[in-house]
Amino acid sequence: MCGIVGYFGNREAAPLLVQGLSKLEYRGYDSAGVAIIENGDIKVTKCKGRLKNLENKLEENPIHGLVGIGHTRWATHGQPSDVNSHPHSNKTETISVVHNGIIENYLELREWLTSEGYEFKSQTDTEVIPNLVDYFYEGDLLKAVIKATEKMEGSYAIGVIAKNEPDKLVAVRKDSPLIVGLGKEESFVASDIPAVLAETRDVYLLNDKEFVILTKEGVKIVDANETEIKKDIYKVTWDADAAEKGGFEHFMLKEIHEQPKAVKDTMASRIAVGQPIKLDDINITKEQIQKLNKVYIVACGTAYYAGVVGKYAIEKLARIPVEVDIASEFKYRDPIIDENSLMIIVSQSGETADTLSALRLAKEKGARVIAVTNVVGSTASREADDILYTLAGPEIAVASTKAYLTQLTAMYIIALFFAEQKGTVSTEKLEEIKTEMLNLPDKVETALSCKEEVKALAEATKNEKDMFFLGRGVDYAVALEGALKLKEISYIHAEAYAAGELKHGPIALIEDGTVVIALGTQEELFDKMVSNVQEVVSRGAKVYAVAQMGHEEVKKTADSVVYVPKVMDLLAPIVAVIPLQLFSYYMAIAKGCDVDKPRNLAKSVTVE
Ligand code: F6R
């Protein structure tokens, strides 16, 4: 996730910007840069790679100035490279901008600005911002930034400096975090509190569309009509370590809470009611989609379980047969692939060795490959024919949560796209699904409110040695993911079963007190699921259920029920998995496990 820092004061800006950026390194980044006003000119230094590279460059060619902006970039539009790094400036280098977020209408804006004579050097969405500000600039930076934001759709936290107003820094946010740090005769803006903590503990927490102006007179905050807004100072009492985690105890919990935004970002600019699905980096044609005889979804671990949901979605909506494969098994079973097969690989990191070798095998056999990945410029994104980036931002906890939710979102987007291209679903139904998808971020937010209930449940079951997770339909896919989460971070043995399969063997293991987590979010399969639950209850199992709101009757069969918001069956995994993620998290806490770095596991598995 990108990080921004801005400084205005009477000390050298460069070291303070670098110090602030170093405190945002935890967010993940692939390049860094600063823009500082030196003797009335904007000087920019930026480069791909670690912050150390930027520091070395600044050591060789120091920039002296008291006002500046800095940035660590996590690539979303365009590969990590020097030219794509921030800050970005207009051609005449009179305006410089750092940006965190996504400008969804950047292609439109770019086209329009190009027709107005503007030129672009990078592949980024951000580069439209300094040019927009330039377009509206008539001697007042604040007014130009306000006008520019009126044109910008999407999410942003930006810091802007201008050659013609060297004693000013303007910043604003919408749907991306931004805070103001208040020092003595100096002030800061930053994406997050850790960036300013070494200098001050007094901050303003900005709301959307609040414009902040840093000048010698101090900090002023105004709305889009330039009416001043008075804010209370927030005194930070956390230590630096807690601040990096946004006040959460662990990255995993922070990332679980980032899920509404991650899902929203992954849909943004791709799904809109009344419009066809838009996928910039997918070039497979309608004819190629129509000819597909088989889709293989290949991945590992959590990404594989997202693929299991993908199978249900693509088969149901696009009527193409789908096989889901564990990547480490794929190439050894001599799969039947030809030029009418499509492979979708799902990989947060885009670097998982088994997944990459499946990708290479498919390409060797002439199949087209779509990579669903979270990392721009990863090997998967470079080697695949088409890419669908999940926009979860960097995931730091080893256990995948927000990446999983965005992988599910990506699976639905691909299924809808294929259905649209093949005409397998009526326009009304497609619109109904899109509308429901656009409501998912709010529903995920609501689902997160089960925290306390789930925490109590984890506390009550922390001494269990084994658990079963049961579900039918896509609930079975969620059960698989729930069991994996519990195994990997709380070291409790967990088995996921398709509920109807239980009586073909594993039910022999159910005895007095066996814990069963039962997922019952599928309306179509609900009665069958209730029967399966009764089968285990009558053999002494303690059943904890996850059901959609409104199903009060579940309380009669299960020992307790966690309710999640009502969502159409196919999309239910997006909300149903939330209590399971929280359950594994609180279980790990109750057992004293290292939540963010579970034993024996690595975030990216680059060996077969
Ligand atoms: C589990 C987890 C792993 C990964 C798997 C694939 O929480 O994170 O199971 O999902 O190692 O990794 P990527 O998605 O990077 O290919």
Image (cartoon, helix red, strand yellow):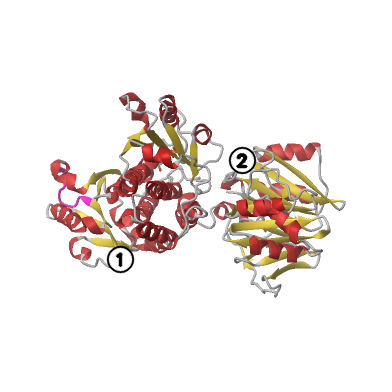
Whether residue 486 is visible to the viewer of this picture, yes or no, is no
Question: Label 2 crowding class (10 Å Cα cut-off): few <14, some 14-19, many 20+?
Answer: many
Q: Secondary structure at mark 1?
A: loop
Residue 330 lies left or right of residue 11; in this view the side is left
Q: Earlier in the sequence, mark 2 or mark 1?
A: 2
From the top left corner, tell me how far across and down residue 584 is, in percent: 36, 50
From the top left corner, tell me how far across and down residue 419 is, in percent: 37, 48
Residue at 75% x, 58% y: name it: 135
From the top left corner, tell me how far across and down residue 508 is, in percent: 13, 43
Q: Secondary structure at mark 2?
A: loop
What secondary structure is the stretch in magenta mostly built from? loop
Quarter assignment of residue 112:
bottom right
The part of the chain drawn in magenta is 509-515
**Residue 6: mark in rendering:** none
Residue 358 lies left or right of residue 69; in this view the side is left
Whether residue 465 is visible to the viewer of this picture, yes or no, is yes
329 up-or-down from 101: above or below: above
* Residue bearing mark 2: 30
Question: Mark 1: which amino acid?
Answer: Met
Residue 129 lies left or right of residue 44; in this view the side is left
